[in-house]
Amino acid sequence: MLFGVVTKPDDDWWIGRNTPDIDHLNKLESLMFQGNGYFGIRSSVEEHYMEEKRDMFVLGTFDKYEDEATELPNLPDIVNFEIKVDGHVLKLNHGQVSNFQRSFNIRNGEMTRSFIWKFEGNEYKLKFRRFVSMAHLHLFVSKVEITPLANNVRIQIKSGIDGQQTNEGTQHLIEGTKRLFNARFIQMQTRTQESKVKFALTEYHRLYLNKKELSLNPHLKLNRRQVYANYSVDLDKEQTLSVVKYANIYTSKDRDLKINVSADSLANLKKISRLSYASLMLESSEVWNKKYWNKSYVEISAHNNKPQIAINFARYQLIANTPHDFEMNIGAKGMTGEGYKGHTFWDTEMFMLPYFIFTLPQKAYELLEYRYLSLIGAKRKAHQGGFHGAQYPWEAAMPEDAESAPIWGNADIVTGQPMKILSGFLEQHVTGDVAYGVMRYLKATGDQSFANRMGYEIILQCAKFWASRVEWNNEKNRYEITDVIGPDEYKEHVSNDAFTNYIAHWCMEYGADIIAKLRQENTTIYDQLNQKLSLSELFKALIQKASMMYVPKPNDDQIIPQDDNYLSYKIIDVTKYKNAEKDVEDVSEIFKDFDLKQLDRMQVTKQPDVLLMMLCFEELFSKEVIQKNWDYYEPKTTHDSSLSYSPHAILANDLGLYDKAFEYFEKSCQVDLGMNMDSSVKGTHMASMGGIWNVIVEGFGGVRVVNTATHS
Amino acid sequence: MLFGVVTKPDDDWWIGRNTPDIDHLNKLESLMFQGNGYFGIRSSVEEHYMEEKRDMFVLGTFDKYEDEATELPNLPDIVNFEIKVDGHVLKLNHGQVSNFQRSFNIRNGEMTRSFIWKFEGNEYKLKFRRFVSMAHLHLFVSKVEITPLANNVRIQIKSGIDGQQTNEGTQHLIEGTKRLFNARFIQMQTRTQESKVKFALTEYHRLYLNKKELSLNPHLKLNRRQVYANYSVDLDKEQTLSVVKYANIYTSKDRDLKINVSADSLANLKKISRLSYASLMLESSEVWNKKYWNKSYVEISAHNNKPQIAINFARYQLIANTPHDFEMNIGAKGMTGEGYKGHTFWDTEMFMLPYFIFTLPQKAYELLEYRYLSLIGAKRKAHQGGFHGAQYPWEAAMPEDAESAPIWGNADIVTGQPMKILSGFLEQHVTGDVAYGVMRYLKATGDQSFANRMGYEIILQCAKFWASRVEWNNEKNRYEITDVIGPDEYKEHVSNDAFTNYIAHWCMEYGADIIAKLRQENTTIYDQLNQKLSLSELFKALIQKASMMYVPKPNDDQIIPQDDNYLSYKIIDVTKYKNAEKDVEDVSEIFKDFDLKQLDRMQVTKQPDVLLMMLCFEELFSKEVIQKNWDYYEPKTTHDSSLSYSPHAILANDLGLYDKAFEYFEKSCQVDLGMNMDSSVKGTHMASMGGIWNVIVEGFGGVRVVNTATHS
């Protein structure tokens, strides 16, 4: 298994690099992401480089700038730390660098960077370290140590809060105010321009000369959207200057707010900055150990420790990016980058939820509670489309939003006109996926309280949507679903997509079962839901529509058609595209040869559709049928989505194709950790993180929720 | 005279640099600014560097983002041009660079850059050139030539429209749309978010292999806020690839708009791009020659050609930054950078207007017409302050704006709280300065039509403001003006600032004279103005207040006190601050030793106040009194403003202090052209450009408007 990071054979918690990589910073910024479920920071290095992408997000602080889709605003940077030696700015592309090591400790999220810098006849030993605290949700702490080895030197430090960051040119924050408290604490207050979420960021520095604290007030420097603390210290050769930076962030969305963002931010930092870097790091590590690592540890015996590192890494990423609050959900890239704007997709229920259900059920509960809160937006979306019940958005941001997917995308290469992005309109299976996630949670946990309070209502609202969505085909005497996009996004406007039809059918049946059961067993809940959903009417509709619903069955060759037309299209050899380096931020290899209209007419699949459906409803198919469909669809799949590898790995394992299973597992691990320095640059792939766990536990381990359409 | 650019002894129109200076790009970006009075571009180089500041502005397109002051939005970048050789991006900090030369042709505004680049065993000859057209207001054209000298190579070009630019983190433009026309023309359409000014930018590329045109359609690449055309060409050794980029910009404020910004932009570029780089360059050069250089050329005999280069450069900057339209005015930094947000100050009337009055009177007319249109905003400002007539804003943007100065500045270093910027409230002399500018124009041109249509009204509205502004001092039986900031901005809240009181007094007297004259000589105009201004009442007020107005007279030592308290303050030695490098973007040297409260109590002057007043009203003072005041104030002046040198140079010349006069002239020229690479980084200093001309023509040449309070 080839990784783009260095690993150590005897350390399952360590990834690193031995070169500064200043022309390829973006991938490491994503991989060494630091977060705690409240906020998260890309691991941009302290000094500035051309290729850097600084990002810091607080979950749930969405803002919409004019005609653009809502997104998590990129917040002012607190990582910056400029060092001048005798007036020269430290940069790794000036002078000589040796003994370079950049390390990331997966166990506690600490990043360290150390090197010797030779510049104009002097030598300096430098060590940087930092973390986002798991013990104090608002806190970031960093520590920098500088030791001149050859000569005395004047060190100038410039460190502060830099609000000139944007989301690729879009600015969500007002300039706001910058000020100083108690001659030492610098603060920036701002807010988003449309959603009016308020922020306060405060920073404080403690300086030590050979471990003896210096009492220095900063020289303040204010620029537009920037506030910096400046310090100047004369160092003798071999003396060490240490600077500890304490920074925090508060927002008006915080449930723990006592007075206001500014006062809370200042009071919190005053209190916390009395503690040392080491003791705050220890507190944070203990939370990681006690709450996460000491529980449900996944241990892998393999020929080397890379699979073990991969699963540790995947769990770190999942935990660090999962909201502390039930009004938020996990973004497709978490908080690790600007890709997908912090939006939540079906990725959560289909790819990440199993991990939480089996190991952190309280988190699974909260992630589904978010979908319950989001019924308000989902009902509006259904209504806007002329449907009933709740239709979940393809891209979800705030619970009250109907749909957050962008509407306009790239220009068509032929006509030159901007093309409509259809996902938000046509990728409707998500409404089945959410219900499916609820079902898996209920089956695994037996959490009847959740079922009564939220779960049943989610499922019934989804079922109601499907009952209004299916279309009667008079000629064929059946209900169908036309004009959708299935999981295979190469095909737009398809009819009777296998995955969509199966999950819609399942959802309606499951809804009918729930109504029947409640009517008999729990009249209180039945009455409550009846008021919202007119259950006897809904029940009749669900029974009638589910029974007359078309779900594509294996044909004479045992193949389930992916949609009404797929099997009639031309077959091409996709080997070239399968093996192409996946640069998920850029155009896929296959689009260099064909446009979407051409792909629409070929038996080429981006990611599993029929096969994923078979994994979800495995009890409906014999092993033989699954094998036939594997043999048919697997060779036609390009895996142009990071969601593609893990279901293939699980299915391969079920079919006894163990080499294939391991190959796909390897590819799942390499989506982010692999050699391709152009992948993950806009953030890691959270569904792939979930996928790594799924392959191990659901696939190799065989532990999974066995679905039947009747609930337990 | 030391310059920070290279010059040639035999070329009065050439400035350049022989080193790439990639760590000091900002000063050259300002000095080699390209503009035509409609739009302007900083001379960022084509490839990207860490220190670059790309800026493009169209005059008059102000926008206000939330709590910030209105400003000219930084528009999408059209200069970018990425070259890859066999997959490697050309950057001057990779590989070796030789024969580097960057040149700026002051005569026609063309910038060229040429060098040999050695990279991984191959050598490339590169030449870049570009200009902003004076013949076609919307047009920018660039040409790049690439010749591999040692081996064959694949060249990839990426060139387009990059809307990720901001004003130091503030984004004024919506994402808008990007599209392609006729498979070759790329276009971005956007608008400002508050003022709703629409923009369209279109780009088209023509490629030549050894001068033979290639017929290639671009591969389009769209990112967020970016659209790029990509080309790939295989070159044999010693073949030359030339790429000509045609780009234009249209806005919804354009008076020449025919259909809409998008259609006009496309139609214009289709037409113009049929012409070659050379012929478009020639057209533009001819406009420079015919309209500007062949008229009123200033020729200087000196020991070398640096003074000649300086005056040519100053005139280039003045012309390139002066609006083509009377609804706009000249910014303190023109369009050369983001400093002062494109706002107009007293700089226009006091420092730049003489150049236009004497050599381009139509432009002087338009600049004053802007002030006439701005009466609407100025009346509102007066009204808001409880005054009558028109009070011009300290910082002016759109004519209808009352005041555009920012209100909140840096945090106080002691209390930590944001400090109010008082200029917009207290720096009131601008209302006298505008009237003074009108007077100078009328006296020099005798343009009675302007006087009747606009000039008299401006002066009378200003006089009316002053009559309402002066305060009666019962004890001293006189009118005074308390609580202002004079030209010496070190002193806030002063009473009876010499410059302010003199110009207010002059304005009221001049107003009274105009009323008297009109009543006798032009009853039509009198009646028109009477309806707006109740002239007989105003006349009485002006006579009464002017006659009882306190204007500080020379004391027993012949010194005019700068304000009521100045002469009582402590005197310190300011030599250190006078000689400090002026880094006008950063804090002045003197503020490193004293804060504003301390400076407030010292006889230290930032820029001339009494001396500037004496220059404006020279007929009121004997040479002896002027000499005494020079001897008193000149040593106390730190020149912490770029406006300081030129009046000192003129006055020194009047006093026969010719060495001093030349020294101050030198310093005027060096404000931007000098050795300090940290000056001008946020833009050049337009008042200083006017000052260079003033010193030569008004000072050494002795040609100036002689003021008397009665109009000719």
Image: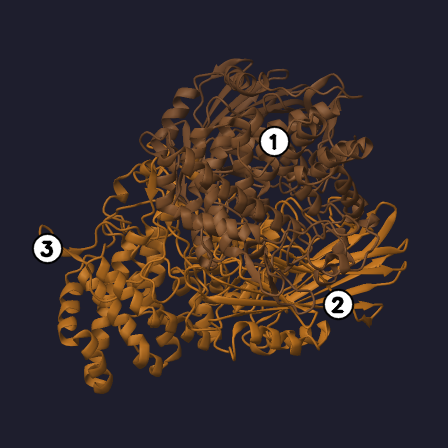
Chain colours: A brown, B orange
Q: Amino acid at mark 3?
A: Asn
Residue identifier under label 2:
B217
Q: Amino acid at mark 2?
A: Asn
Q: Residue at x 30, y 50 (%)?
A: B485
Disc number for residue B405: none
Crowd around label 3: few <14 · some 14–19 · many ≥20 (10 Å): few
Query: Which quadrant of the figure has residue B307?
Result: bottom right
Disc number for residue A705: 1
Give how far across and how far down residue A372 sits, in percent: 44, 40
Q: Residue furthest front?
A: A520
| Residues tagged 2 and 3 counted as in contact (Cβ below 8 A) | no
Q: Amino acid at mark 1?
A: Val
To the question of a shared chain for discs 2 and 3, the answer is: yes
Query: Which quadrant of the figure has residue B412?
Result: top left
Query: SS for tag 2?
Result: loop
Q: Chain of mark 1?
A: A
Q: CA distance from mark 2 to mark 1?
A: 54 Å
Q: Residue at x 69, y 68 (%)?
A: A414
Kindly tell me whether residue A235 is visible in this rendering.
yes
